[in-house]
Image (cartoon, rainbow, N blue to C red):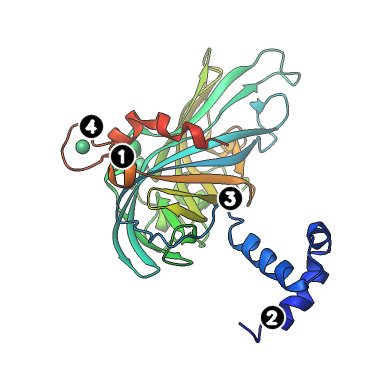
Amino acid sequence: MAKKAPLLLFLVPAGLAGASACSSGADPRPDVSDAVEAEGSDGTDGGCEPGDEPLDLLGTWAARAWVDVYMVTPGGGIVHLCPDPRVYGVSLITLRVRVYEQTGTAVRHVFNVCRLQMPLVEAAIDPLCASTVGMQLAIGRPLTQQWPDIDYPGGAVLGGTGTCSTYVADPLVAVFGTDETIGATETLPTWRSGCESDPPTCVDGWEHVVDSDGDGHPGVTLTVTSEPGDLIVGEAYTAYRTVDLLRGVARSSSLILGEVEPEMDYQIIDSDVLVGGGPLPPQLVRDNIPIFEIPRAGSTFVLLRADGRYGADDLDADGSGEVTCDEILAAESIFAPYQP
Ligand SMILES: [Ca+2]
Ligand SMILES: [Ca+2]
């Protein structure tokens, strides 16, 4: 510690000139410790003072992430978003997290995805958006039914063993519609631009496509619907991936708050879509269904203990001894105070 002080003394005036102007002391030492403390507790809303109370994360948690997305019409399509081709929305991801081991600052857990809701956007055919409809993308029913039972094992690292320690989870990687050779970073199977043949011919990486939701169509099914009317309706068969990195502060043994660095992306590898009542070839569906642009920063999450310990709500409504995704979704108003 003593060795580091001269370096900090050197860095603080250079890096935090504005902040140190607000500090009162003439003695530089309190300024340095203030700066260090502020940095350590700066994860969410400040105010979290590291305490002596030991942190116990074992048990079942309910989690919600609010992911900022921009949905963008690729261009060249019949259907476009309104009023701009680039529309802001929020995707909601609801998770169950079971922490089964905590050794010092290392945590082991299993994540389950309870639900992923994509934003409703306005779309139209006419360029001036005089007559718009709501367009909704969603994960198809086969996957939404299977998802809660799929375990994503992983871990997290704490910055300390007391309350207000930092919390950094392993990336939550969920890939659907491909074999296991496609992970967090490999290129998803992709329809070659301009190709007008069948999917096995047109999709680069077709050999990696798997009917992972078991609905008889390649890849995993996304549905697109519009209300009112049937401007655009049908199914897109996709390779789909979401990667979420959660970092925050374990404020207590029943509350973790922080930011999520998200990625979400999909490639349409086949489809069955009607636009204005007429079928649309797969190579054109890509131009008519919005793609996602997700900012790296600004999205937030909360983990709330859900098993009744440490003063938390007990979401085990049926007394089965286990908190299920259905029980979390039935009690989702618990997330409301943390909505950004
Ligand atoms: Ca499928
Ligand atoms: Ca239960």
Question: What percent of the width, then of the height, locates residue 33?
Answer: 66, 69
Which residue in the structure is indicated by mark 2?
A: 5
Amino acid type at image mark 1: Gly
CA distance separating discs 3 and 2: 25 Å
CA distance separating discs 4 and 3: 33 Å
Q: Which mark is residue 47?
A: 3
Residue at image point 43% right, 55% down: 172
Q: Nearer the viewer, residue 201 or 238?
A: 238
Amino acid type at image mark 2: Ala
Dot 2: few (<14), some (14–19), or many (≥20) neighbours within 10 Å? few
Q: Earlier in the sequence, mark 4 or mark 3?
A: 3
Contact, CB < 8 Å: mark 3 with mark 1?
Answer: no
Left or right for 277, reference 81: left
Q: Which mark is residue 317?
A: 4
Q: Residue furthest left?
A: 320
Look at the numbered disc 1 and say if its residue's Cβ is closer than 8 Å to ligand 1.
Answer: yes
Question: What percent of the width, then of the height, locates residue 337?
Answer: 50, 33
Question: What percent of the width, then of the height, locates residue 25?
Answer: 78, 65
CA distance separating discs 3 and 1: 52 Å
Determine whether 241 is above or below 144 in the image.
Answer: below
Locate residue 9: give its quadrant.
bottom right
Q: Which mark is residue 91?
A: none
Look at the numbered disc 2 and say if its residue's Cβ is closer than 8 Å to ligand 2.
Answer: no
Q: Which mark is residue 216?
A: 1
Mark 3: secondary structure: loop
Contact, CB < 8 Å: mark 4 with mark 1?
Answer: no
Q: Earlier in the sequence, mark 4 or mark 2?
A: 2
